[in-house]
Image (cartoon, rainbow, N blue to C red):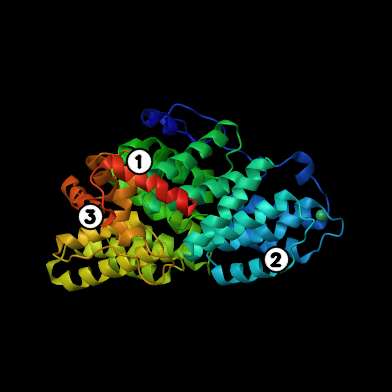
Amino acid sequence: MSSLLTSVPAGVEIPGDRNRYAARAPFPQNPFVGFRDELVSPSCATARLFRRSALWWYGGRLDAGLHYATEAVDVECEEGHEFCRLAPYWRVALLTKSRDLDAGWRVVNALDGRREESDSPLVTATSLVIRGELLFAMGCVDDGLADVTEGLRIAEQCEARSLLPTGYVVMALAALRRADMRTCLTYVDKLTGEALLGYFGQAAGAWVTAQAAEARGGVDRASGLIAGIVTSHLVLRQLLVSEPAAASWLVRASRKLGADDLAEAAAAAASAASAAHPGFDVIRAAALHSAGLLEEDSGKLLEAANLYPDRWCGASAREDLAGLLAKRRSERSNTIRIFEAALVAYTAVGAARDASRVANKLRDFGVRRGVSRTVECAGELPHGLTNTEFAVAELVSQGHTNNEVGRQLFISRHTVAFHLKKVYQKMSLTSRVELAASWKAMQLRHGS
Ligand SMILES: [Zn+2]
C-alpha cells in the first residue's frame, strides 16, 4: 500500500533530510497542462481573458483570477471556440474556491438552462465536475459526488485530462471525511498516476495526498509531503486560495511533527494571502484559524469559526477552539457545548470520520453522543446503524483489523469491538466474513 503514496505529486520539492519520498518532477509551469494545444490557443478576447484569469489564480491570486474570469464571461466569444465555452465554468470553479457559494449556485443554474444538445463531451464533463465540486463545498455531499462521478466518467472517456485532478481531489477528500479509506486511496492513486504523466496541475492534489498518508499511517508518513508543500511558494500560495481547510491542516500537522518552522511558515503564508485578498471571508477565516492554532488564541479561533462560509471548516475551527478550552477547567461547559456544535456540523455534511473523533473527545468529558445523522442529511443509514457503526462496518468489510479501524476513527480497539457487536446485532450477522459479503451485496443493491 505504501507504494501508492511514495511518489510525490509533480513539483513538490522535498528539502534535504525530509526527502523520504524520492520522486521529483517539476510543478507544471502553467494551468493548462492537460489541455490539447489547439484547444487553448484561440486568440479572441474571451480566450485571452480566460488564460489571464487562470494564470493569476495559478500564482495564488484569486481576486485577480475572479476579476478576469468575470471579464472573460462578459465578453462573448463570437467564434464558437470550445475553449471559450469553458470560461463560465472556470468562473464557477473560482467562486467555489472563494466560497461565494450563493453566487456560484446562481451562475450554475443559469448555465444549466443554457446547455445545448450539441455540447461536446468536454463541456458536459466540465459542467458536471464543476457543479459537483460546488455542491460538495455547499455541504450537499451526495448530490455533489454523484455529479463529479458522472463528470469523471465522461472526462476519462474523452481523455479530458485537465479536468481529472479537480474531480479526483473532491472524491478523495469526501471519502477521507467519511472514513472510506479504500475509495480515498483509489483516487489518491489516480492523482499520483496523473502526476507521473506530468498532468498534475493542482496543489490541492498534493494536500489531499498528504492527508491520506496521515490518515493511513500517522503524520510521520506525510512529513515529506508536508515539508514539500510548505516550502514550495507556488504550491503553497495556490493551495491557500483553493482549499480553505489547508492552512489549518498544515499548521496542525506540522506541530504534530514538531516542525515549528513549517507551522510558522504555513501560518505566515495564510496571513499574507489574507492581506492580499481583503473582502474574501474564507481566506481571512483560514488565516485566523491557523494563527489561532499557532498562538493558542481562542479569540482568533472563535472569529474564524464564525467567519467561515464553509460548514466543514467552521466545524474544524470549533473543534480546535474546544480543544484549546478543554485545558481550562473553568471552561468545561463551554468546551462541551462547542464540541457538540462541531459534532452536529460534521455529521450534517457526512464527515463520519471527523464526527467520530469529536464524539470520542466528548467521551473524555463524560458526554456520550451516538454519532447519528441529523435530519438535514438526506437518506437514512441502512439497518438503523449510527454513523460510527457505519464507518466501522465499512472499514471491517474492507478487511481492516480492529486496531486499524480504531486508528482511522480515533477510538480504541475495544470501542471498535463494541460497535462491531452492535453492527452484528442490527444486521443479524455473526462474523467479519458474513459482514464483508453482506456489505458488498448491499453496496451493489445501492449502486455505489
Ligand atoms: Zn473565443
In this view, the residue in front, 378 or 26, is: 378
Quadrant of image for the N terminus: top left
Location of ligand 1 given as a quarter of the image: bottom right
On screen, residue 144 versus residue 316, left or right, reads right
Q: Position of residue 10 (x, y in %)?
A: 54, 35
On screen, residue 310 versus residue 434, left or right, reads right
Q: Which mark is residue 425?
A: 3
- Tell me the element at label 3: helix
On screen, residue 70 versus residue 380, left or right, reads right
Q: Alpha carbon of mark 3 to alpha carbon of mark 1: how far? A: 19 Å
Q: Alpha carbon of mark 1 to alpha carbon of mark 2: how far? A: 40 Å
Residue 146 lies in what quarter of the image?
Answer: bottom right
Does residue 215 show up? no
Earlier along the polypeptide chain: callout 3 or callout 1? 1
- Tell me the element at label 2: helix
Q: Residues within 10 Å of mark 2 (few under 14, many from 20)?
A: some
Residue projecting furthest to the right:
79
Q: Alpha carbon of mark 2 to alpha carbon of mark 3: how far? A: 49 Å
Earlier along the polypeptide chain: callout 2 or callout 3? 2
**Amino acid type shown at disc 2:** Leu
In this view, the residue in front, 310 or 181, is: 181
For marks 1 and 2, give the one nearer the viewer.
Answer: 1
Q: Are marks 2 and 3 in contact (CB under 8 Å)?
A: no
Residue on which disc 2 sits = 111
For marks 3 and 1, give the one nearer the viewer.
Answer: 3
Residue 349 against residue 9 in the figure, above or below: below
**Amino acid type shown at disc 3:** Gln
Earlier along the polypeptide chain: callout 1 or callout 2? 2
Residue on which disc 1 sits = 398
Q: Position of residue 211 (x, y in %)?
A: 39, 45
In this view, the residue in front, 30 or 39, is: 39
